[in-house]
Structures are given as C-alpha cells and as structure tokens.
Image: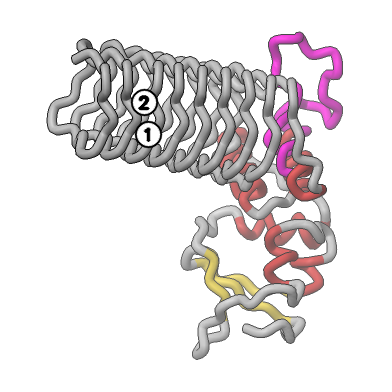
Amino acid sequence: MSSGFDSFIRLNIGGKKFCTTVDTLTQREPDSMLAAMFSGRHTVSQDPEKGFVFVDRDGKHFRHILNWLRDGVVPTLKDLEYPELLREAEYYQLLGLVEGIHAVLNGSKDEDDDAKMDMTELTRTDIIKCIQSKRVRFRGVNLSGLDLSKLDLSFVDFSYACLRNVFFSRANLQSAKFLVVEAEGSNFHNAILRECQFMGANLRGAVLAGANLQSANLQDACLIDCSFAEADLRSAHLQTADLTNANLEGANLEGANLKGAKLGGANMKGANLQRAYLRHVDLRDTHLLDANLGGANLLDAIR
C-alpha cells in the first residue's frame, strides 16, 4: 500500500476483521505504532483482493484499542483481562492507554513518588517514552525486575544501573553500554548484544543463551553460573572474566580473547574455539568434549 491511504481502513487482526479510519488510527496517539503504519510514512501490505491490512496479533481486545482511539476511555473489564489488554497496548505503543490501564490497576493515576529505594524507578512505559523521545540514557537507574523484552534499546547507556532480574529477551541492544552494572539473574535470551560493553559488570546467573555477542566486551565481568548455550561470541573480549561454572555448550567463540579468564567447571562441550586466544588459561576443570580448538592459541595453557 502506498502513502496515499483512503480515509477508510480495513484491518485483519489475527483473523478478526475491523473497519476504521485513518483519523482514528493516527490522531489520539500520534507516536504509536498504528499511527506510524497509517500516517503515510511507511509502506503497508494490503490484501489485493479484499483490501485488508493484516496484523499478526490476537484480535480479542482490538475493539477496545479502537474504542480508546475514538473516545479516550479505558474500557471496563474483568480484572484478569486488563493484563491482556495492557500487553496489546504496549505492543501498539499506545502510551495513553497503557497509563490508563495502570491507573485502573493501581486505583490511581498518580504513582507513589516516595517509593522505597529497592523498588524500580521507572516502568516499561517510561522506557518506551524515552525511546520515542530519544532520551535513552539510564546511567545509575534502578530498573530491577522490568520486562524490557523485544524493545529496540540499541546504543542505550545503562552504565552503573541496577538491572537485577530484568527481562531483555529478544531485545535489540546492539552497542549498548553496561559498564559496571548489577545485572545478576537478568535474562538476555536471544538478544542482540553485538559490540556491547559489559566491562566490570556483574552478570552472575544471567541467561544469555542464543544471544548475539559478536565483538562484545566482557572484560573483567562476573559471569559465574551464566548460560551462554548456543550464543554467538565470535571475537568477543573475555579477558580476565570469571566464567566459573558457566554453560557455554555449543557456543561460537571463534577468535574470542579469553586471556586470563577463569574457566573452572565451565561447560564448553561442542563449543567452537577456533583461533581463540587461550594462552596461560587453566583448562584442567573445563569440559571440552567435542570442542573445536583448531588454530586456538594454547601456548602455556594448563590442560
């Protein structure tokens, strides 16, 4: 579909059919995903025969989405349905609706400014607002426990932040900075972490399975008990990192620098260590069954 939309729009949301207008989709929440799709700035595919634009989401609550865009009123739902609607509102980046749902769930539109120090300082909604306004720096901020999955957080500076148990699964974090962060127990499953900086970070027990960590810098990081299963660590910097009991089974460490890294009890079964730098590394308690060490620098390594 070109930028020249008719005012009348037909939508197929996961198999459910809806009819609305461009004005409805763009005026109330002009920074939302729906507004971006139908503002004319992007090309959107349309069924050539029936004229429906398909969106691969559950259509159960989309009528509430449309009614919010028309009237600005948060619907009255059963308590168990609000989290479902909240998830859809977050997906479409309808921040006004997200705030309205939170107000219903919390019993007030105003959040408590006197929160305890161990509570998260920002919400997922706040993070999305910052992304949209280009204010993407969270140095020293407490984001513990937040679900930031699938967001585009590339180049964001999280240095010195508290990120314990944050859910970053499938997020785009390319070139993000995590210098000296506290990220124990965080989940980076299948996240894009190319060229990220984790120097001195505490990632004890974090899940990085399937993550893309090409050329990432994890020097001096605490990676004890971390899972890097099937992760891409090609050309990663792991000098003096503590990988004690870490799971690197099937990981790709081709060309990685592991000088001075602690690998006691690490599982590197089936890992690709071709051309990896392992000089002076103690490998006596490292599990290397079926690991590929072709061309690796093992000078003075202890085996």
Residue on which the image places disc 1: 209
Q: Quadrant of residue 149?
A: top right
Q: Is residue 188 left or right of residue 147?
A: left
- In the rendered view, tell whether residue 289 sits above or below residue 55: above
Task: Tell me the number on the disc at residue 227.
Answer: 2
Q: Which mark is residue 222?
A: none
For image coordinates 64% across by 59% down, the residue present is 63
Q: Left or right: 139 with respect to 234?
A: right
Magenta extent? 103-128
* In contact (CB < 8 Å): disc 1 and disc 2: yes
Where residue 44 appears, as percent x and y from the top left, is: 61, 76
Q: Relative to the observer, which residue lies in front, 158 or 301?
A: 301
Assign the magenta stretch its main secondary structure.
loop
Mark 1–mark 2 Cα distance, whole angstroms, equals 6 Å
Q: Residue at x 76, y 9 (%)?
A: 116
Q: Secondary structure beneath disc 2?
A: loop
Q: Give SS at disc 1.
A: loop
Residue 97 horizontal/vertical position (percent): 75, 47
In the depicted structure, whether residue 260 falls above or below residue 152: above
Q: Residues within 10 Å of mark 1 (few under 14, many from 20)?
A: many
Confirm whether residue 107 shows in the render. Answer: yes
Q: Residue 127: where, in percent of width, then height?
A: 72, 38
Q: Is residue 185 above or below residue 87?
A: above
Query: Identity of the amino acid at label 1?
Result: Ala
Q: Residue at x 61, y 22 (%)?
A: 163
